[in-house]
Amino acid sequence: MKRKKTSKTAALTASANARAAVGSNGKHQEEEQMQQPGRRVRTLLAVLFTFFAIRTLFKTSSTSVSIASNFTPPELTNLSILPEGINNLTSLVRTEFDDFYAANVQPLLDLGMSTFNGTLHAIDEKSRVGYQLREQTARAKHPVVMIPGFVTSGLELWEGLGCAKKHFRQRLWGSASMARTFFADRECWRKHLALHPQTGMDPENIRLRSAQGFEAADNFIASYWVWSKLIENLADVGYDGSTMSMMSYDWRLGYEHLEKRDGYFTKLKHTIEAHHATTGEKVVMISHSMGGTVSYYFLQWVVADVKVGGGGGGKNWIEKHVHSFVNIAGTLLGVPKAIPALLSGELKDTAAMFPQLGELLEQYFGRRWRKNLWVTWGSLFGMLPKGGDAIWGTGADLIDDEDSNENGTEMNGKSESVVQQESLTKTLLAPAIVWNNGTDAICPSSSSPLSENTTPASEVPISEEEEGFTLSDLEIPPSRRWSMKETIEYLFRNGASSSYIYSPDSKKGWKTRASSKDKRKHWSDPIATPLPHAPSLKIYCIYGTGLPTERSYYYKVSCDKLEGTSNIDQNTTCSDDTQNETQCTNSTVQDLTTEEEPHEAPFVIDNAAKDVSENIHSGVRFTDGDATVPLVSLGYMCQKWSQRKNPHNPSNIKVYTREKKHEAQTSLSDPGRGGPSSGEHVDILGNLGVVEDVVRIATAFEVEEKVDEDIIVSDLKEIVQKIDGHELGGSNSVVR
């Protein structure tokens, strides 16, 4: 089940990346401190330059002295010694000085700062991979289409309620003004960021749309770069707006709704066809994060028949138009951190800071507020972990310390709540959720008490008069554990109606015929759908490793909040089996854009849960990954696809896995980021090794010699073997 530590040497070898990643809270603080000097130096340089510029202006410039001599106080004779007279004097002096400053001081400062930044840019240009490859004769060849990830594209307001009309065509997401809008009227901001909980589409009289062009995702806020470094390096070798495109999208929408509302996949198909037609070259698709899942959905959609909701491109469309799919930090098998976001409106960071900043956090961005916003985003349901217990339940990527406590006493930094669960480890699936209230019963005074001798929660009848969120709703078993399958099924049953466009059953997806409309519910799941026919296509899985990444969670029930609360009121539940789109549209799910206070889930992450030896901190168990996506999701399918005669890759597409071990560095020209060797989820777009791989692939410059090979620095191969060798069978189990 879990990775056993047969010897200390074997354990260190097998789990080096995960241990080094997770047991490094102190290290992260040191890295943060290391980054501070970069900010301070740049600020100091700016201050010193300003000082010397003004000093030079007034001391050595004869021109400036001459101009300054003409700056005389305004006439005072007609001003009475009254408050309004003083105000008028102040206004006149301020106006005169402002004019003088604007005409003489500001241009000099602008020139100096421009020269300073230009010097940094010139230095940076020669160090850029694109510049260096251009010097080696690399030139633009394959057109490039970029598909950004979750939350990294700007969202603009095209229609809104009265509180937001002044923001027409301004970004409510992805700009500096976003923060001002949020704090000025956070409820107005929430209403406009939420989708309709019944349809997963636009609420009435509200329309947010993705920003367009490279500006949509080059920088998130101000100078916080996302795609800009990659774009700049591609420009170095000759790319521009005629040979590459940024295909941004509304990342809140479920994948099916992207096409239904915005025609996104049709536009993506036409963009690729246009680049192919105008250049005569196949296109390189580059995705990041959730963009990898969106791209995988597209590859299924584009070859599917129009009758089943596909793009109608035919079996050979990809073979004709797409050269390669570069999947950077892709969420191929989902992200566990979507679970607490949908379950209780929590993230690792909010749970950890709660004891210190909980009151302030809850006041401005509380759990119930977050949860009832996030459950309207169909994209989050699409990012839930895929493959169920066959992948995640094996625990192949988790560490089981040989010093685990068997006597019930605290040791190795274990909290009592963790110790109480350890005896179950050897016999049960690796859990996604552990309910951590105690050993006897959770909330024994509840209307639906649960203990080992009670009827299973799923069989407890609920009277029509009974209201509120009870333990029957939670369906907590005697083991106090939910497997990944149980967790995902609960979220689909109790989530917003937009979840109906997905199916969490990978095995069902594999058995569903391609001619069925239900097949599209599985197009985003590579466990449930094989790669399409494209024998000459190349797939590159590029991602970072060596950072602590969320994997599973310890929860506790808030017994005092158990009664009188509920999930979103769903008189009509849009389940995978019983509901169609019309029924979901006409359902009576509570409209979250009303003034009603959102309900609060009666459970929270138990931030007291801790076990250093098993990488459990503040109620979250960590594993190796890129700090957002676990290694299992990043690399498992890439390894499966590369296996010969694998049913998930019937046309033997060549697949390469390129891991980048995280190495934090400080850069004067890029303060506040992870540095040129970062493997962090977003910063990897500026990783020099990643940039080099991408530029080489796009230009077809020494690709076979430099890129077309695996680089695996983690325990990925061992993890894949353990998953496939488990009695649950891994991805192979869905095709049996």
Image: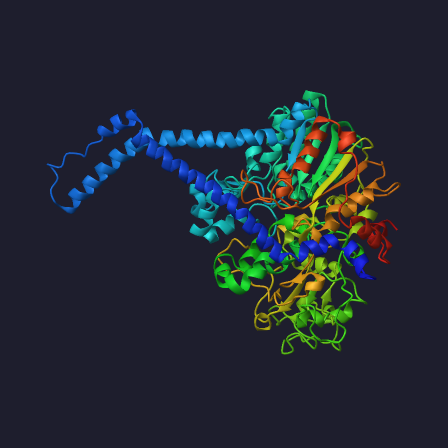
Rendered position, 45 above or below 394: above
One can see residue 160 in this view: no
One can see residue 288 in this view: yes
Q: How many marks overall?
A: 0
Corner quadrant of residue 312? top right
438 relative position to 194: left or right: right
Return the x and y of residue 150 as percentages of the image width and height: 62, 45
Return the x and y of residue 577 as percentages of the image width and height: 74, 54
Work out whether residue 429 or residue 190 is closer to the camera in this orientation and state it: 429
461 relative position to 45: left or right: right
Work out whether residue 390 or residue 602 is closer to the camera in this orientation and state it: 390
Rendered position, 135 above or below 77: above
Quadrant housing the N terminus = bottom right
Return the x and y of residue 92 as percentages of the image width and height: 21, 36
Q: How is the image coloured?
A: rainbow
The residue shown at (80%, 55%) is 390
The residue shown at (69%, 54%) is 20
Rendered position, 283 above or below 383: above
Return the x and y of residue 640 as percentages of the image width and height: 82, 45
Work out whether residue 359 or residue 666 is closer to the camera in this orientation and state it: 666
